[in-house]
Amino acid sequence: MSKNITDCNGIPYPEFTRGTVTYCDKLNGAVPDGSVYCLKLLIKGERKPVPGQFYMLHPVKSDCLLARPISVFHAEQKDGSVEVTFLILVKGTGTVELCSLKVNDEIKVLGPLGNIFPRPADGEKVLIVGGGIGVAPVAGFAESLAEKSYDFVAAFKSGSYGLENLKAENLWITTDDGSCGIKGMVSAALTEDVLKNGNYAAVYACGPAPMLNYVKQVSEKCGVQCWLSMEARMACGMGVCLGCTIETSEGLKRCCKDGPVFDSKILSFPQFKNSFSSKPNRWGSMAAKPGEPQKEFTPDISFDFKGVRFENPLIGSSGTFGFGVEYESVFDVNRLGGISSKGLTLEPRQGNEGTRIWEVPSGVMNSIGLNNPGIPHFIENELPEMLKLKPVTIANLSGSTTESYVEGAKLLDKTDVPVIELNISCPNVAAGGASFGMTCQSAGAITKAIREVTKKPLMVKLTPQAPALNEVALACIEAGADGISLCNSFQGVAIDIERGVPVFDKIKAGFGGPAVRPIAVRLVYELCSEIKKLPINKQVPVIAIGGIEKWQDVVEFIMAGASLCQVGTATFANPLAMIECIDGLSAFMKRKGYKNLEEMRGLIL
């Protein structure tokens, strides 16, 4: 590896290599404890990053597709290698993975990336401002400056960290709760008078957008040059994906390649609301003033479906959870809101021949073919056991002909099953299933036929293959559906390349899992938008299905308009997925101030 290869501006060219973890542990001083980690990587070669730059980090063993951009906090040469230190805020799956690394673990590294902080001239005094995890890159920059040639403002919500390498003439720490330094936000330390009296040549800042907006305004008002380190979601870090662009007065700029450091004069920020409003904002967040405790409450996550109470919105999806009792020894299934039975037909079925399950990236393909014991057997054997459980029992009704659907519905109507889910969406059968859900006429007709033979609450489960899905759903509602389950598996094709043949005997098979979730969210959003246009007395709830694996997915579907959520493939990978979703949903609602599901349902509609 060549030493110190740089461009004409003295910025090191990036390279794709691997680093070895030399240290990874939670950072003292960060509040809450364990919210910020310190990660040190030993990277072979002498290509040392310049303050302001970042790396794309991706653990060799990772569940994430993309690397995560992390700013450099500190770097030093070590025997022909560079040890780079990062401060990482635990935020999502990617950062959790990074913070879970052990010494000697390998990590894929792309970098150093981005431009750098323009250095002040010799003898010039500057002011450096860091907010929260934004302290990391500016503290790294400060470390490269002469001792006492700068003042430093560090703003945190609570506690403080990342300041050990500073040699500032003046160091001001602010905390929202007053736990360290001055009580208040950055404005408690950085004022127009401070800027004017400090005779600063420039201001450098990194932190949350509202803070950067304030720093920009006060600096420009005082006529002081201001440099801001920005962040944006990115995929490549190299300037080619164009996913991290930000708006500037000079047009769109790439945060990774043109930045992350920008002249504040070309940047603009949205109008930020008062961070300490005591009224709920449009996201339902009830922000308390510093020092003011949140009122304790337990969110109501129940939902009433035509008089049937679901204690929470999590339902074991049909075909993925058996009849519920199978998982009793694995976890407390009584915590679920509901359980939808295996797809049931009037007669027993053996299902499809050949390969039935095929794993693909971020999902599973299946061609089960409604393998089930038949409705009479279900009524006599499985249903009594399901009814002993606390979750709402949902009988998933399927068939090959209208007559078989109707006869099955008549039998179920005579039982104590609380809810029927009409399955006109199965993609893996030659007759019936999805064929009934493809057009408004056929879907409306089968729904009407079932509605005429049962008064039980009726969900209709639709296929995403329908060319006019919303119209099909509205036809079902008009025909008597009390709710719409959306959506069943997407169709796909898998090929065994070693044998050169299709994996499945029927060629096409159902595909579900995390990969379909964004599409399913779109379908739910579009349908809920259409249902919202109906008269109040004709509006029905939507039961979301498609790639749910964690509580954040549940929240997303509810904000898109869903009332209940079915979980399928995720249970295969993690039997506790639904329990984690229930707990996570409640914790999220409590943190954001949502008293019940209705307060956040359909927020984006």
Image (cartoon, helix red, strand yellow):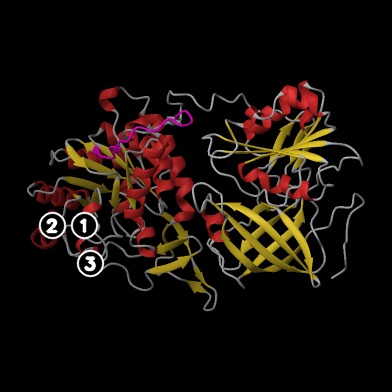
Determine whether, in the image, residue 552 is placed left or right of residue 25. left
For the residue marked with disc 1, what is the amino acid?
Answer: Leu
Majority SS type along the magenta span: loop
Residue at 73 percent across and 22 percent down: it is: 192
Q: Does 174 appear above or below 219? A: below
Write down the residue under mark 2.
Answer: 383
Write down the residue under mark 3.
Answer: 329
User: Picture quarter containing residue 224?
Assistant: top right
Asked whether 298 falls inside the magenta stretch, the response is yes
Determine whether, in the image, residue 410 is placed left or right of residue 133. left
**Mark positioned earlier in the residue sequence (3 or 1):** 3
Mark 1 lies on a secondary structure that is: loop
For the residue marked with disc 2, what is the amino acid?
Answer: Leu
Write down the residue under mark 1.
Answer: 344
Asked whether 389 falls inside the magenta stretch, the response is no
Q: x%, y% of residue 313?
A: 29, 44
**Mark positioned earlier in the residue sequence (2 or 1):** 1
Q: How crowded is mark 3: few (under 14 residues within 10 Å), some or many (20 or more)?
A: few
Residue 487 visible in the shown view: no
Q: Residues within 10 Å of mark 1 (few under 14, many from 20)?
A: many
Q: x%, y% of residue 264?
A: 76, 31
Is label 2 in contact with label 3 (beta carbons under 8 Å)?
no
Alpha-carbon span between mark 2 and mark 1:
12 Å
- Quadrant placement of the C terminus: top left
Label ID, residue 271: none
Residue at 44 percent across and 65 percent down: it is: 507
- Quadrant placement of the N terminus: bottom right
Considering depth in this image, is 13 or 567 the residue closer to the camera?
13
Considering depth in this image, is 36 or 509 the residue closer to the camera?
36
